[in-house]
Image: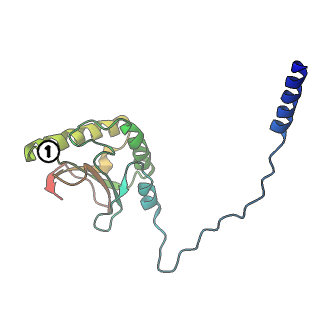
Amino acid sequence: MKRQGYWMLAVCLLVIGCTPAIVPEAPLATRPSPSPQEAPKPALEVALAALPGAVPAPSEGAAGVAYPTGSLFAQRAVLPMPGGPRLLEPLVELLKRYPQQRWRFLVSARTGEGAAYDERLARQRRVLLERYLRSRAVALEQIEFTLVAQAEVPLRIVARQGAQPSSSEVGKE
């Protein structure tokens, strides 16, 4: 009797599991058309905004993003946070997708330990980023690395307007 009950339960579960679920079709959500005042964003801005861990940060009318403290670098760390390569891999793909685009990477540190320490930390972060990008076959000729004294964010990336990258420099943001 018990065996027959298990057999019936198994058959019922099999029938229920093989029966396709009938779900009523929901109307497709329509995307509102942009108003005449609202121009669509260029593909580069959309791609930058989609980078994980980064927040949109346009600079002087150019598209850009910033990686705030705690997303890519910890407060006083040279090495990226755990999961840093996961954040950098989409950036690598973006850089490869736009080979003619010139970029400016503003690398900084603000620790409260003094300007010399912050500059040394920013320089080490820049070297680490250069090595990582080179190892991922990114053309470093398209990137200008600039050390920025004690800026709010450890890394800001700005799309440049047609200028050729030059050597690294230390400046104020």
Residue shown at 78% from the left, 57% from the top: 24
Q: Position of residue 119 (x, y in %)?
A: 13, 45
Q: Position of residue 82 (x, y in %)?
A: 35, 35
In the structure shown, which secondary structural element does the residue marked by tag 1 occupy? helix
Residue under numbered circle 1: 118
**Vertical comparison of 104 with 90: above or below:** below
Indicate the quadrant containing the C terminus: top left, top right, bottom left or bottom right. Answer: bottom left
Amino acid type at image mark 1:
Asp
**Vertical comparison of 55 with 27: above or below:** above
Residue shown at 69% from the left, 63% from the top: 28
Q: Position of residue 133 (x, y in %)?
A: 34, 40
Q: Position of residue 111 (x, y in %)?
A: 16, 45
Q: Nearer the viewer, residue 27 or 89?
A: 27
Q: Report whether 144 appears left or right of 51.
A: left
Q: Nearer the viewer, residue 122 or 164?
A: 122
Around disc 1, counting alpha carbons within 10 Å, would you say few (fewer than 14), some (14 to 19), or many (20 or more)? many
User: Quadrant of residue 78 in the image?
Assistant: top left
**Vertical comparison of 63 with 75: above or below:** below
Indicate the quadrant containing the N terminus: top left, top right, bottom left or bottom right. Answer: top right
Considering every residue shown, the one lying at the far bottom of the view is 36
